[in-house]
Amino acid sequence: MNRAQRRSQKSPKSNAHRAGLTYLTVAGVVSGSFGLVSPAHGAALNLTANSCETINSQLSSLSNNADGGTLDISYVGECVLDSGYFMSGNSTINGPESGDLTLQVPVGLNYGIASNSELNLSDLSFVAPQGMGLTLSILELGNSATTSITNVNFRDSYLNGAAIYAEGSVTIANSSFTNIQSMGDGAAISAPAGSTIGISNSVFANNQASDEENGGAISAWGALTVDNSTFRANGADDDGGAIYSSGYPLVVTNSSFDSNGADRRGGAIYALYEARISNSTFTGNNAATAAASIFLGEGGVISNNTFWNNGAADIFSIGVDPVSAYFFGNILANDNPDTVKLLDPSQSIIDLGANLYTDSSFDDATTGDGSSALTTVEELKLTGLDSNQEPTVNSENTRYVAIAADSIAYDYYQADSAGINPTAGGAMLSLLAESDQRGASRPLSFGYDVGSYESGNKPVESPTEDPEVKLADTGFPTGTGYLGLVALGSAAILGGSAGILSRRKKA
């Protein structure tokens, strides 16, 4: 299947999802959910709720008003939704500032809240417990929906689909998805082609996509951007233990992936289209057949990351097939390099320098100061993740692996080192990162550290507004001189670059 075909293809969906939210506005009835009435027209509503009873009555009023409105909830505790609610107008639902409100979606509903318009949610928790029947989704967002989700927790749910099924544009910040079991792809988020998802400062932990589905936490067939987020102990019965991405570029920055697993390929990430992964940490991820940490189906850029102890015997840490991927400034390490290899020797990479690796499956092609080099875990002097550090929403930083001051990775290269080519002859964005995974400035002093961690203190930050996530910005440059990642596998020469070779490894 070529790229154009992948882009036009949607991920598998249930019959209710195939019908889409357009069906809701026409038919007026959702099987197993509730009967819709023609929404009333009038001014946008300003509503409040201080009890479970008024929460349901005000949600009903909001869903029946074509002009939408705002619902501010002060009630603290648990509340079972009477039905599912479809927001036909632009709507905002704010929970109490403490966030101590849990909305329970009853068993067997198609969804708890749906929208085909602008929807803003904050300071809420959702659960969908197991029963005689399974809820399809907690949030159902149509292809015309623009949704903002801030300080919202999705937890302890058993679903036929995903906690969020999103056909439109969604921004998620300071939120968490924990202990969600799904019979579909993407237990936390499932997004078909045409969707645009931006995630920041969020946690995905202990989510599972079962029944031979992809994406333990996220399955995205549209554009996906992830920043400063933690993925821990997620799993998929097929590909992509934490993230499954297909059809559009995947961008991951400043994030951590720990102990995720897939029953096939891509223990942490499975990306069928181009991917850019930077300033992130991968530890203890595994897959049953290939690519314990990440699998790249059409190349990408892997820069300033730390990979440590991903995979088991005969399972390579990283899979790159069939198109080459660029590697720059990464730590690639396994404690037992004789039995756990970094890359399949039959696959191809493009080495841009400053990669430190612990076995010869990474066949570097750089020379000079700062060039890639074979090393040992003892020389890297890595500091492991704190096993007691649980991922928390909007924490000081995501989980990372530090290096000691006498590590070989410390001050390993400078911007003008002869053995690096962070711009690939001007064909790509510069890979000289301005900060590390925690936000500490790069370089600290004499030179840049290899990996996701720079051995310096994180600067004191002044209070800022919630981070803006540019949903449409994939992070890849454009212009007439840009070769583009689409051409990585076929371009034999990078204009203006010297000493950078694409090698196909020998078995």
Image (cartoon, helix red, strand yellow):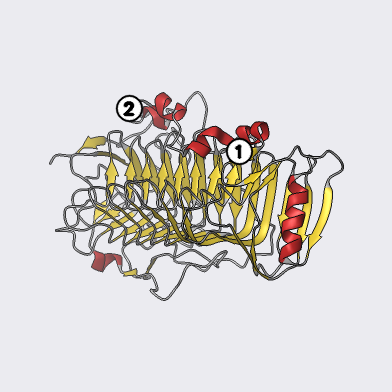
- Quarter of the picture containing the N terminus is top left
Asked if the residue at tag 2 contacts the one at tag 1, i.e. Cβ–Cβ closer than 8 Å, the answer is no
Q: Residue at x 48, y 39 (%)?
A: 429
Q: Mark 1 points at which residue?
A: 142
Name the spot of residue 351 as percent of width and height, x first.
Answer: 30, 42
Of badges 1 and 2, the one in the foreground is: 1
Residue type indicated by callout 1: Gly
Residue 93 disc label = none
Please tell me which residue lies in front, 121 or 484.
121
Image point 51% across, 50% down: which residue? 226
Query: x, y percentage for residue 247?
Result: 43, 33
From the image, tell me which residue sits under label 2. Answer: 493
Where residue 177 appears, as percent x and y from the top left, is: 51, 59
Q: Quadrant of residue 244?
A: top left
Would you say residue 470 is visible in this rendering? no
On the picture, is 154 further left or further right than 58?
A: left
Q: Does 284 sit left or right of 358 as displayed?
A: right
- Above or below — where is 439 with respect to 250? below
Q: Residue at x 39, y 65 (%)?
A: 401
Mark pair 1, 2: CA separation? 44 Å
